[in-house]
């Protein structure tokens, strides 16, 4: 039997996950020791990536494309991250992109034009990250002394996280992608892990 797309995605990005997890900045997030200004900057990068993906994969833009059935409304719900930005008095419309993020947003636009199915790679990374982020939310709330919004994004699905993740996995696995499409999805997932690494390094260097 050929390997399923979600197994291919996990194995081919496993080392990048280890690298991202081991990044100093992710460690600061994961232990809740991140300085507030760096955290607010990071939230803006997350918002910009999600917002761009939501726009590029909106119903209008993907109408008629074969993978539309994999996409669900909750994938594009920006309410948690918008609320978190509000806690730091940041207007989402004025979110500032670091250079790694700006480059990545252009890359996503390019994919949307040339090969929209590849955008499932970034979606995989952002959805998959909800697995570990759930624990991060607790540490961030403690470390940054947040009552109410501020780190809701990291546990944005709450009790539904497992259900949504398993649903995404099974929808992706049930879908037929050809070899070329699978390779493009994997390449875009790798680029997404890389941007998380680069954003961490850029914030560390500030
Ligand atoms: C402190 C940093 C991190 C920790 C502790 C962490 C931890 C975890 C854990 C525990 C899982 C679930 C593994 C499983 O149930 O099999 C997971 C999955 C995942 N994480 Fe992370 N993670 C971190 C950072 C990141 C970052 C920065 C990204 C990328 C944005 C990311 C993307 C993913 C993806 C895509 C999966 C799903 C893997 C799969 O099963 O296909 N993680 N992570």
Image (cartoon, rainbow, N blue to C red):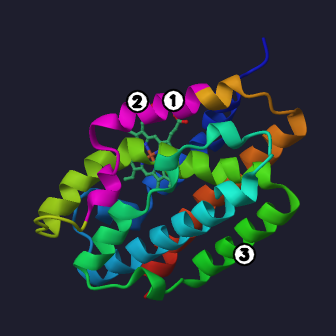
Left-right relation of 70 to 86: right
Occupied quadrant, residue 181: top right
Position above or below: 59 against 182:
below
Counting from the top left corner in percent of width and height, residue 4 is at 70, 24
Asked whether the beta carbons under mark 2 and mark 3 sit within 8 Å of each other, the answer is no
The one of 27 and 51 positioned closer to us in this rendering: 51
Secondary structure category for the residue under label 3: helix
Quadrant where the image shows the N terminus: top right
Alpha carbon of mark 1 to alpha carbon of mark 2: how far?
A: 6 Å
The chief SS type of the magenta part is helix
The one of 6 and 15 positioned closer to us in this rendering: 6
Counting from the top left corner in percent of width and height, residue 89 is at 27, 85
In magenta segment, residue 166? yes
Occupied quadrant, residue 158: top left
Alpha carbon of mark 3 to alpha carbon of mark 1: how far?
A: 29 Å
Occupied quadrant, residue 2: top right
Asked whether the beta carbons under mark 1 and mark 2 sit within 8 Å of each other, the answer is yes
Which stretch appears magenta? 151-170
Alpha carbon of mark 2 to alpha carbon of mark 3: how far?
A: 32 Å
- The residue positioned 26% from the left and 62% from the top of the image is 151
In magenta segment, residue 108? no
| Residue labelled with disc 1 | 167
| Residue labelled with disc 3 | 106
Secondary structure category for the residue under label 2: helix
Question: Can residue 138 be spotted in the picture?
Answer: yes
Q: Residues within 10 Å of mark 3 (few under 14, many from 20)?
A: few
């Amino acid at each position: 039997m050929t390997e399923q797309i979600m197994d291919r995605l996990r194995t081919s990005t496993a080392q990048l996950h280890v690298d991202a997890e081991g990044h100093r900045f992710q460690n600061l997030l994961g232990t809740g020791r991140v300085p507030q200004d760096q955290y607010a900057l990071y939230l803006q990068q997350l918002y910009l990536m999600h917002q761009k993906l939501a726009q590029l994969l909106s119903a209008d833009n993907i109408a008629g494309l074969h993978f539309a059935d994999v996409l669900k409304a909750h994938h594009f719900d920006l309410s948690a991250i918008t609320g978190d930005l509000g806690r730091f008095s940041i207007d989402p419309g004025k979110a500032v992109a670091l250079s790694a993020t700006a480059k990545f947003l252009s890359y996503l636009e390019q994919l949307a034009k040339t090969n929209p199915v590849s955008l499932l790679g970034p979606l995989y990374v952002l959805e998959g990250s909800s697995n570990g982020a759930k624990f991060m939310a607790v540490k961030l709330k403690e470390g940054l002394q947040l009552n109410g919004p501020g780190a809701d994004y990291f546990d944005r699905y709450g009790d539904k996280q497992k259900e949504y993740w398993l649903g995404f996995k099974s929808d992706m696995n049930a879908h037929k992608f050809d070899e070329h499409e699978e390779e493009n999805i994997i390449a875009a997932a790798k680029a997404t892990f890389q941007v998380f690494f680069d954003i961490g390094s850029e914030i560390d260097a500030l």
